[in-house]
Amino acid sequence: MAGPDPLDRIAAALARGAPDSSDYDLAPDLRRRNARDLRPAAVLIALQPEAAGASVLLTKRSSRLAHHPGQIALPGGKPEPGDDGPEGAALREAHEEIGLDPANVELMGRLSAHETVTGFHVTPVLGRVRAPFAPVPEGGEVDEVFTVPLAHVADLSRYRTERRRWLGQWRAYEVVPYGPYYIWGATARILRGLAERMARCG
């Protein structure tokens, strides 16, 4: 007999509403951008069911990039003409960045949007990876593709707040480290949003 679906809690969590989040939630003293100036973006939280539960696909951005080199990120980026909303943009970017075929993803829903201090209005899209696949990092953008257990990012005790100087001011931000990977900033805050919803489901 098949065991419980490790993503059942995700489906239940998505049925619960939650307010949008922002990098400014932890850094209210930073000068906030006009909402009209925010640029849309979408990221894919790709969830892989596994024998021991499930995992989340993450990338380590190329150290050669001009913006956010070497940072841990969810696959994603800005929408392009022809994308079918945030879902289409997230799937296209995941295909380009890590070789994940859109046909191999079952869309599950969206999390609340997240505003970044770098001027993006990010829509997180969740999707179940239907079948195992071998990631192919796009050399110009991605140095590494790796997975983190869903149980790790769903555990609120794993998160903490740190701070550093940014543009001459102290900025506080979320972190959820995993092994050698320092997951922080918007990526950590988006994952925490998922963890908070899951926690409310029991």
Image: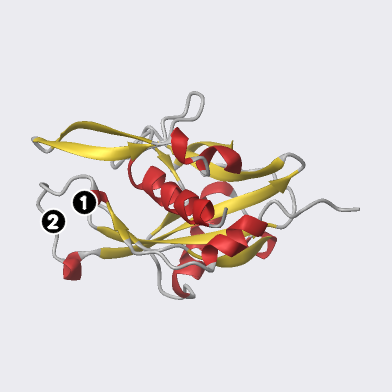
Residue visible at 34% across and 36% down? Answer: 69
Would you call the spot at circle 2 few (<14 residues within 10 Å), some (14-19), or many (20 or more)?
some
Residue 67 spot, x, y in % from top left: 29, 42
> In the shown orientation, is residue 154 left or right of residue 67?
right
Residue visible at 23% across and 32% down? Answer: 163
Mark 2 — residue?
32
Residue visible at 48% across and 49% down? Answer: 195
In depth, the one of 129 and 13 nearer the eye is 13
Circle 2: element type: loop
Circle 1: element type: helix
> In the shown orientation, is residue 18 left or right of residue 146?
left
Q: Amino acid at mark 1?
A: Tyr
> In the shown orientation, is residue 37 left or right of residue 94?
left
Return the mark for residue 144.
none
Residue visible at 43% across and 47% down? Answer: 192
Q: Is residue 123 above or below residue 7?
A: below
**Proximity of marks 1 and 2: CB atoms separated by less than 8 Å:** yes
Mark 1 — residue?
24
In depth, the one of 24 and 58 nearer the eye is 24
Closer to viewer: mark 1 or mark 2: 1
Q: Is residue 85 above or below residue 104?
A: below
Q: Does any portion of residue 117 appear in the rendered image?
A: no
Label 1 to label 2: alpha-carbon separation: 7 Å
